[in-house]
Image (spheres, coloured by chain):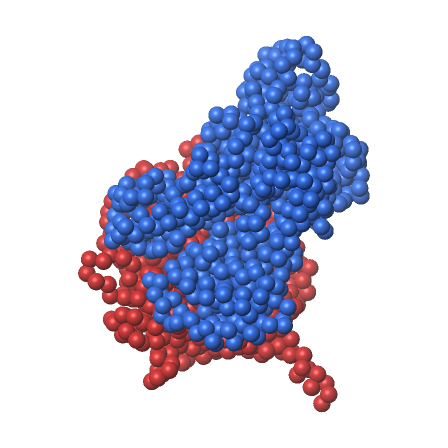
Chain colours: A blue, B red
Amino acid sequence: MSARVQVSVDTGGTFSDFTYFDRDGVLHSFKVPSTPKSPETAVIAGLDRVIATGIGPSEIDIFIHGTTVGTNALLQEKGARTALVITEGFDAVYEVQEQARPYGAEIFNIRYQRPKLLVDRAQVIEVPERIGSRGEVVRDLDLDVTRARLQSLVGQDIQAVAVCLLFSFLNPAHERHVKALVEEVLPGVPVTISSALCPFIREYYRMSTTIINAYLRPVMDRYLSELDRAMSSRGMTSKKRYVMQSNGGVASLTATAERPVATLMSGLAGGVMASLKILNQAGISSGISFDMGGTSCDVAVNEGVMAEIRDRFEIEGRHVCLPSVQVETLSAGGGTMAWVDEHGLLHVGPQSAGAMPGPVAYGQGGETPTITDCNVVLGYLGDRPEVKAHLSLQPELARKAIQDKIAAPLNLDVNEAALGILKIIDIKMSEAIRALATSKGLDLRDFTLVSFGGAGPLHSSRIMRELGLKQVLIPARPGVTSALGLLHADVKHEFIQTKPAGLSSLSADDYTQALAELVKQAETYLLADGFSPEEMSTIMQVDLRYQGQGYELSVEVESQLLDREALRAAFDAMHERKFGHAAISQPVEVMAYRVTGVGHPSRTTSAFDTSVRSDAAETRGAPTHRTAVFEVSGKWKNFETPIYQRHDLVPGQTYLGPMVIEQADTTTLVVPEQTVVMDPYGNILIRDERVDVEENKNDRDRATV
Amino acid sequence: MSVDSISEEVLNASLAGVVKQMQEALFRTGFSTIIRESHDASCAVLLADGRVAAQHIVLPLHLGVFPVSVAAVIAAYGLDDIGPDDAFLVNHPYIGGSPHAPDMCVIKPVFVNGALLFFTASIAHKSDIGGPVPGSCSGKATDIFSEGMHFPPVRFVRDGVVSKEVETIIRANSRTPDLVMGDIRGQLGCCHVGARRVIDLCQKYGLETLNAAVEQRIAATELVIRRTLGEWADGEASAERFLDDDGIRVGQPIRIAVTVKKLGEELHFDFSASDDQAVGPANIRPSLVKAACAYVILAAMDREVSVNQGILNAFAITTRPGSILEPRIPAPMNTYNATVHAVINASLDALGQLGQAAQRADGSDSRSLIFGFSRPEGDVGSAISYEIFAGGSGASAGFDGLTGCHVNQTNGRITPIEILETEYPLRIRQFSVLHDSGGEGEHRGGDAFRRDYEILMDQTRLSIRSSRHAIAPRGVAGGGDGRPGAACLNPDHDAKSLSAREVNIPLGAGDVVRLDTPSGGGCGVKISSRRRSCAA
């Protein structure tokens, strides 16, 4: 029997989510507690649990992993002892960085500190060499001096080396020589050279990325080797073992061990890719991925079926220039706290109660009211099975905390206070989404909010209303959506050549050659991964900019032949669409060529094509009822609100809010004057429909018969 | 009318979102790199009398700009002659509130139910608005007429139609007309975005509710600041800082002096003792002094507040007419940054003496190097390289200063060497840290850096607008001073020293220009020297 089981695991801070297709194509999911101190333990435990269900290790065809190992090592500054090799006379590049503070509150911090340098001054080696701006050698690399200077690192317990020389993206010869010398002087120490990792113009960003990569390599290598060994020792034979990359594609364990910096957004990319896949399947083109958990909320706005990719991003003040899905993290989650300050002003966030003590209602000693406490007090959030397993909600504690800490000092009643706090957090999230959309020039009216994570579906119906969106979509398994996204990922290899030239003076042969070489590289990598030509595709892009501009846009091209006019027109149009204007008389420059090789692992099933129950409506469980509080015309009002179990919803049937839909991994809230329908894929769709009260009542009665 | 705390927070969170959205719209549609990359632009929503309802702070100095500029529009046109589909340009430092002429405001009235109730406004630095030097900022200017075109409030849009006349004049007087008009259009667009949102908020929540929420929050912001001031010890302290010179009277230092008086919830900055107005472009207007003091208070408070008029209302300043901080027209002001740094450093120093600001040594201010290249005929590419540099930042209690990092109000990113060499006939020969150059102390000042430029083409010209080449950044609490900066031509042979402000020095292929930035001051007595003094 051929191997067809597909397994994914998404490591989170508290839980690691597993999803897999068994040999019959049936989808399963479960959670295991994460083990931050030795992250492989949780992953291996989950794999053993899959195997314990009777699946033979040799039946596993694909294993895909979203990991935070690299990210955590960077944030906690627990990477390797790293040396840096640079062009002589340029040690200020790394130290001065951008020369600026981040925008925002840090401007007012007169004691602003940068994140700690990952390489000490004493481990920076300057080598005599220089490449010029056309790739020409201005000063030869002095091999003897270089070797002698590298010798000074011997005996210093150097565990990794980063090499970043000026203009190496145009001419990598010196970096390659240096690499060979390092391997000679420090045998066995992994060397990262910038021209191989991220051959982009702008030396500081390239250097920072190269250093982070070197810094993380030993950590990532050890981690992935453990996993690899564990899989093989259990009898898994397939080599399709992948890790999600920041760019939304996956790469092999070997490739990932060499490029750990490319996984810094691994954990977030799964969710974004999942929401794109869900929308695509439902025939919806524009969506907002909204993943709200306990402490934060990850938001990505995507127009069309492709994930929006950015070339550069920051992580806690460190700079990385590698492609990554565009995703913003907001400080808003179930644990976000509300308090009244000594001047009587109400604050909601960004501080969070975290996992401990957590919300007051969890009874773990929390005293400050949180968003979750408001959801409990208002009757939205009840004891869910998976919550019950760990603890029991204590609404009285939450009510008392909101009464004492918020309502009393503000002279409000408890319901007013709780509704108000939710309104404020919803406005804050809505404004952040609006700013994000505006920064891309998007009109949100036709967008669908794909809402998941433990807390997302409790807030999305109000956020949709605030933003005037078309609808909310709650996927079938909101608690493990990111892990499901992993099951659908394609293998991606990205190649770039930076070679600035004026579009009008560019040689057509150079253009064709640059793209052809990159395509060849991409195909070579995909073949090595075991993909047949039918399973692979390539995407070609050219980075263009107006002369003198500080940024480029990537324009996709179909042919390797240069068509100046078409390229120019496509760039002008893209600039117009993204930035609201084009400069059709301004000269255009080609900055770089990019090719992405995509390998599509063969798949038969969609993780999002959840079979919905086909039995008659009469056999389904009737809703229970609970008193929940909603705002109507500025005043709160009690509603006897139906509480449905998700699996009891009849596909195609329209339900009317208010209602609460419970399932194992999340709770969905529908406010008054909204309709709900479950689509053929098992997604819940919520829309704003203001229906008059009488009709509302009738419909609800009908729905609950 | 008053609103409850929830509505107050909901509406103010919404307004904070509106100005953020305006800012994103401006960053997206702004044409020039100055807006898109350097983010030298800000946006605000104001009440009909010009008080700030909400502002997104990108650059702290922009806080004081809008009230003065809106007041100027009202004074110039009168409320009766402002229509719902009009928009105005203001960049006049004396009549409006701009730091200098290249910072241009676009101001749009917002009408609700037929009444003028709000303004939306944006300010952004323009690449060139005429004058004797590219970029409009001559370090040798002696009046504002040498600093580019000025627009006291001028109606730029009437009844939704852009004034062709005004646009024609701007285009004819700028070296970069497309960039300037592109940016102005972007600013106009973001004012429209803001206006639509404000009208939506009025419709959704009611005008009275919105107004009450804004008024309450302005009052609350002022109250929070005043209460914080009330917790500080009362007292009076003075401090001073010196600028190298004003670029014209070379070698003659200029004194900025402040006396800070704190009594109860009142805080007063008195700058009367500062020197007379400068002949060269080192002057700043009181609205900038006010914004600088607001920066100082927010930095000292270490607490986030809503950004609105309440901040400016919470304290008082005095400047002396005819002084460098309240010059008389037409005294020039285009190199205002060094003066603002001095105002902030002196004020923080004084507050520090009262025990109310973290002790921090001075940083290195900011400076720019401008290379002008002659380009072959027909090549319309940019022929001006404009770079902004910091130096070492100052140390503070608990922290060393940083190598090459902006402080206070300036925050320009450095231009990558690879971009510079790709675009211009220049080669950087070194960009190195001047190790251990930071002022000594328990915590060391941030190190300076050195840049050597090799000129690759004849007929190149260099302008420098720097500061602190004579007077070093000051240390604090027993820490040593930083090192002053320096510039010279051909350091390896025939070295010729350059001054901090140079205009259009001719250079040829093979010439080398060296810039050493200043380093930051240290903080606290150096441990080893303290030990020594104990032993003695």
> Where is the N terminus of chain B found, in terms of image quarters?
top right
Seen at 62% across and 37% down, the residue is A8
Residue nearest the observer in this picture, B205 or A691: A691
Q: Residue A507 placed where, x, y %?
A: 26, 52
Looking at the image, residue B496 sits to the left or right of residue A195; the answer is left
Quarter of the figure with residue B299: bottom right
Seen at 76% across and 44% down, the residue is A357
Residue B296 visible in the current orientation = no
Seen at 70% across and 83% down, the residue is B531
- Give the answer, above or below, for where A483 lies relative to A588: above
> Where is the C terminus of chain B found, in terms of image quarters?
bottom right
Q: Residue A70 placed where, x, y %?
A: 61, 52
Looking at the image, residue A144 sits to the left or right of residue B354; the answer is left
Residue nearest the observer in this picture, A91 or A337: A91
Residue nearest the observer in this picture, B193 or A659: A659
Looking at the image, residue A332 sits to the left or right of residue B387; the answer is right
- Give the answer, above or below, for where A236 lies relative to B131: above
